Amino acid sequence: MSNDQDLSKIERFFTSLLFGHRKAVLVLFALLSVFFAWQATKLRPDASFQKMVPVTHPYIANYLKYENELRPLGNVLRIAVQNKNGSIYEAEFLETLRQITDEVFYIPGVDRGNLSSIWTPNVMWRQVTEEGLRMGPVIGQGFQGTPEQIEQVRSNVEKSGRIGSLVANDEKSAIILAPLLEVDPETGEKLSYGKLSERIEKVVRDKYQNDKVSIHITGFAKVVGDLIEGAKDIAGFFVITFVLTVILLFWYSRCWKSTAATIFCCSLAVIWHLGFVSMLGFGLDPYSILVPFLTFAIGVSHAIQNVRTMAAERFHGATKMDAAKATFHLLFIPGTVALLADAVGFSTLLVIEIGVIRELAISASIGVGVIIFTKMFLLPVLMSYADVTPSGLRQVAKQEGGDHKVSHALSRLTEKKVALGATAVAGGILAVSMVLSSGLKIGDLDPGAPELRPDSRYNQDVKFLVSNYSTSSDVFVVMVETPEGECGAYPVASAVDRFQWEMENVDGVEGSASLFTVMKNIIAALNGGNPKWLSITRDRFISNGAHKNIPTALYNAKCSMTPVILFLADHKAETLKRVTDRVEAFAAENNSDDAKFILAAGNSGIEAATNIVVEQAQKTMLVLVYSIIGLLVWWEFKSFRVMLAIMIPLFITEVLCKVIMVQLNLGIKVATLPVIALGVGIGVDYGIYIYNRLESFLAKGLNFKQAYFETLRTTGVAVALTAVTLALGVFTWAFSAIKFQADMGMLLAFMFLWNMVGAIILIPALIRVLAMGAVTKRFGPSVVKGLN
């Protein structure tokens, strides 16, 4: 049995099932909808540190191995408290700083043992005296805020060496460092960054910020918290999209029944989608919260074909039942293949080993899956009851009776000279675009948190810290593994000392710190402060004596690992690559049984790993998305050359999208990489619908030009409206407070619209240039009869 016969058999089966048992179908869909709506109510915001990073990458695996030891250098909140009218050395301000430190201490999820500020006992001062090395907490017990005690605090801060790190260079603000636990030890549940951010805002910023004190908060958790807060506006954007889509669909169809049935089915798809996601145990993070927009937009865009076909069948005299059946028959195969192509585009994102992207891929694939049921199966059944209104039939008559000047003009693309010209222009655009897109980079290209807008509160807080503190917030941590108990031994000290000297000479590294940075200062202090002793030592007794005074954050409990902290000028992709390459080169040359340098921790180390994963995954993802979608197109149309004609416009649009990214100073990263897969996966729909309709007219004996004119006349406006609907569904994201959502919205809107333009203009031209032989072989010599 041929493939066409198999498909025809499947169509007959579903036609009989759906239209022979319409009431049972409606009852089943109603019950499922109630169930999925109940499941959807269980959805909660969900974002975690490990979901945002590639946990399988060796760098991250190394970090997670020592996560507890590196917590003070990992997921940390930095809360800067500024005295607007003076310095920190005022009794009122110091009392405010103490109160804020206490507030932060009791926030669930804060690692209280590693909390640091000038009020905590783990922040010490050291001084060399005639009696030897003296030390103590910066603010001791019994502090009452007297002038003498405040002056002592000033002296202790200077002796602590924390100016530029915990205390601002101008001494007008001080930082509270709050390392975070991924799991709340009190509840055993995963830390909620949304709740944490709300709590910080409520008990710190809202409570203490006034005309005398300002609060500035940075850190990964705050970024995610602000993303979750900004994502709350997404419901408003969805309402706007919903209303605009209803208006657009009614304007096109002039039939309130078709519009209502379509919007109902697509809204149902969103509910099913959310319920299914909840059943899988997923939540809504700032990335996946956008997927319901896509589900709704994809559903409506595909349903436009149903609306147009149903109205046309009724206009030509079919009963409402026959028209519904004909609509199902005409659109079942191309619609299903197009939706499968969408799902393939989404599923290729699974090659990116980052939790939020994989959940986005699964969520989007589920969204497409439910559209197949609600749009392909439910909508035709509903339309068999609803029918088309008289105004909808008049709209069809108006569309059928127009002069179709645009369709006549575009049908000339089937003429050989015009087709060659269009193909040449497309080739030129592609060549220029590939040159311009060569400047596209991997990773973040902007300071601060590029996920948020430059004028966001968070990025203003980052700007404050960068301007007032010497210690960079962009920290790259290299872990040095040693034999147990040997982390302070001379062979390790020698290797680390050479490593720090070499890395401090790398462009983009502002400074470094390690166990041995402190050890050298302590050795010099124990020897009268003589700078000649400011060095590492071979004498184990001297190093052991110094070691007991070194903060435990600089080595683990077994003394088998010590971190080297590199402070970077920024976290731009080229800086991270330069640092990473140099660290790996040093490790390859110097790793030994005594000291093994492994990457990477710190926010910049983790981002470097993410960039590597994104760079590798983008190539694999593109190969997969084009290969699998191309295979689906070939399977449906049985021609390699036709497949090329449909796929080439997608490739041109992809390259043009990269040009726009270069112009907007956007790199390929977690937020932008999905755009390409989504754009290609959804963009192929236009080509599938156009060529499927074209084939139906060629099968009736029309030549290529006549068939393409009829294709444009009957379904061209529907295809254009499909693109507009899709673009509208994502363009409202451009107004989001979250920059990466705005970027995704603009890029996807461009790809959806340009893929439509490319399909309408290039597919007939490319078929004429590349595939006329294959088309003629299948449909006979009538295809080329009378063609120029």
Image (spheres, rainbow, N blue to C red):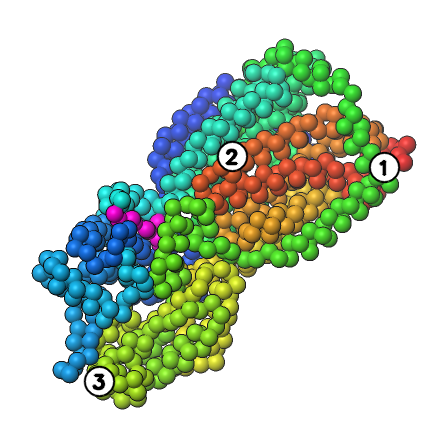
Q: Dividing the image into 4 quarters, which one contains the N terminus?
A: top right
Q: Amino acid at mark 3?
A: Gly
Secondary structure beneath dot 3 equals: loop
Crowd around label 2: few <14 · some 14–19 · many ≥20 (10 Å): many
Quarter of the picture containing the C terminus is: top right
Provide the residue span drawn in magenta.
Answer: 212-222
Left or right of 309 in this view: 642:
right
> Is the residue 772 above or below the residue 320 in the image?
below
Q: Amino acid at mark 2?
A: Thr
- Image point (63%, 10%), residue name: 390
Give the CA distance from mark 3 to mark 2: 67 Å
Q: Residue 394, position in %: x, y?
A: 67, 13
Q: Does 216 appear in magenta?
A: yes
Residue 154, picture quadrant:
bottom left
The reply to whether residue 471 is visible in this rendering is yes
Between 260 and 436, which is closer to the camera in this rendering?
436
Image x and y of residue 63, in percent: 37, 64
Q: Residue beneath label 2, please? A: 732
Q: Is residue 264 above or below residue 585?
A: above
Alpha carbon distance from label 1 to label 3: 92 Å
